[in-house]
Amino acid sequence: MKKLVVTLTLAVPTLFVGTIVGQQNQANRMKAADNTFAAKAAQGGMAEVELGRMATQQAANAKVKQFGQRMVDDHSKANEQLKSIASNKGVTLPNMLDSKDEATKNKLSSLRGAEFDKAYMEDMVSDHEKDLAEFQHEADHGTDPDMKAFAAKTLPTLQHHLQMAKDALADVKSTGK
């Protein structure tokens, strides 16, 4: 009888810990494609915020400044939502710009006024076209329900950003500033 009590006393906590570890491992098991999407979305979101801040300071055109502030506001919010989802799944997101975004930031940091406006808005149009394709792919083909929902929920905002970017670029090209 004592042997049975000792065995049960040792077995129950082990079973409980095993269940918790199993649940944590399940949380870490987003498919590679969903992990890649999350990492790229995090990096892109960070870049949008940093470049948007730069636009609010270096742009000459009012639409470009407004667009930059919108990038800061909207992408900061989306970044927080993405971080929350990733954290709940045990996924660590990048916290630094990748080399491509760092190069863009360095290039833009040397520009001011109309030169900045044109270069920034051209980058934003191109970037948001790529973002839309990636978010649409995740919304349609992702395997993690939370990542799919995040992508689908973010798509209308990205579509609006692309239209705003195209409008601001047209304004920059037509006015020369």
Image (cartoon, rainbow, N blue to C red):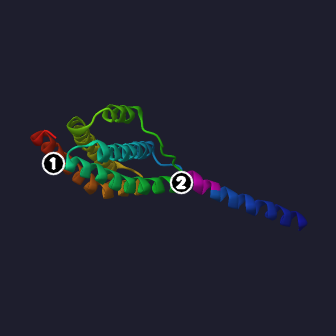
Residue 171 horizontal side relative to residue 150, left or right: left
Q: Position of residue 126 (x, y in %)?
A: 24, 39
Q: What amino acid is at disc 1?
A: Asp
Q: Position of residue 35 (x, y in %)?
A: 45, 45
Q: Position of residue 62 (x, y in %)?
A: 20, 50
Residue 58 horizontal side relative to residue 175, left or right: right
Q: Quadrant of residue 37?
A: top left
Q: Nearer the viewer, mark 2 or mark 1?
A: 1
How would you rate the neighbour count of disc 1 (Cα within 10 Å): few for under 14, some for 14-19, many for 20 or more? Answer: some
23 drawn magenta: yes
22 drawn magenta: yes
The residue carrying mark 2 is 27
Q: Which mark is residue 144?
A: none
Quick one: label 2 or label 1, which is nearer the N terminus?
2
Q: What amino acid is at disc 2?
A: Ala
Give the residue displayed 40% in from the left and 51% down from the top: 143
Residue 95 horizontal side relative to residue 61, left or right: right
The residue carrying mark 1 is 167
Give the spatial CA distance, label 2 vs label 1. 42 Å
Q: Position of residue 119 (x, y in %)?
A: 24, 36
- The kind of secondary structure element at disc 2 is helix
- The kind of secondary structure element at disc 1 is helix
Residue 94 horizontal side relative to residue 129, left or right: right
Q: Quadrant of residue 48?
A: top left
Give the residue displayed 23% in from the left and 47% down from the top: 64
Q: Which residues are magenta?
A: 21-26
